[in-house]
């Protein structure tokens, strides 16, 4: 009969326990790593969706209204018309305004130094985390609509 001492059995048992614990930790680490990778990929896609979602076209009743005196009118981006107003760091822009028939010199002559009302949708994008640039949905001067893309 084969005789195995208790010392050998205890040592073998400890080695086996060590191997099992190591394998369990390895499997848990792999699961954790997989979960972190999946979370990172999903977060990346969510960020891409937030960045490239279009500015919503909303009814006029859902727009935020800002009235102020125009300090400057200039072109930025791709044919965008940008209004800078007094007493606010926010810039207001008409997307592709020059392509839509607006004339920069005419807007400057008509609006600089005058009180205008801009209406814009509630909208946020990661490209403007401090929310300092607003998309104009409607621009009015003396109750005359200069620009509007609002739905009825």
Image (tube, rainbow, N blue to C red):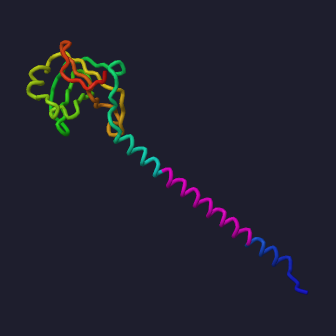
Q: What is the magenta range?
A: 16-39
Residue appearing at x 34%, y 22% in the figure? 59
Out of 45 and 37, give the one closest to the viewer.
Answer: 45
Vertical relation: 9 (above or below) 39: below
Vertical relation: 45 (above or below) 8: above
**Residue 17 shown in magenta:** yes
Which quadrant would the C terminus be assigned to in this image?
top left
Q: Is residue 71 left or right of residue 105?
A: right
Out of 100 and 131, give the one closest to the viewer.
Answer: 100
- Residue 71, image x, y percentages: 16, 23
Q: Is residue 22 left or right of residue 152?
A: right
> Residue 136 sits in which quadrant?
top left
Residue appearing at x 12%, y 24% in the figure? 107
Vertical relation: 147 (above or below) 20: above
Outermost residue, bottom side: 1
- Residue 103, image x, y percentages: 11, 28
Vertical relation: 14 (above or below) 139: below
Q: Is residue 146 left or right of residue 42?
A: left
**Residue 101 shown in magenta:** no
């Amino acid at each position: 009969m084969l005789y195995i001492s208790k010392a050998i059995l205890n040592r073998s048992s400890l080695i086996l326990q060590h191997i099992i614990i190591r394998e369990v930790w390895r499997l848990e680490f792999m699961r954790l790593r997989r979960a972190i990778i999946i979370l990172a990929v999903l977060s990346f896609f969510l960020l891409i969706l937030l960045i490239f979602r279009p500015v919503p076209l909303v009814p006029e009743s859902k727009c935020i209204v800002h009235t102020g005196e125009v300090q400057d009118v200039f072109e930025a981006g791709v044919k965008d018309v940008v209004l800078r107003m007094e007493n606010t760091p926010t810039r207001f822009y008409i997307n592709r305004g020059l392509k839509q028939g607006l004339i920069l010199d005419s807007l400057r002559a008509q609006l600089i130094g005058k009180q205008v009302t801009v209406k814009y949708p509630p909208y946020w994008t990661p490209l403007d985390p401090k929310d300092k640039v607003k998309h104009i949905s409607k621009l009015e001067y003396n109750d005359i609509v200069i620009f509007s893309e609002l739905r009825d």
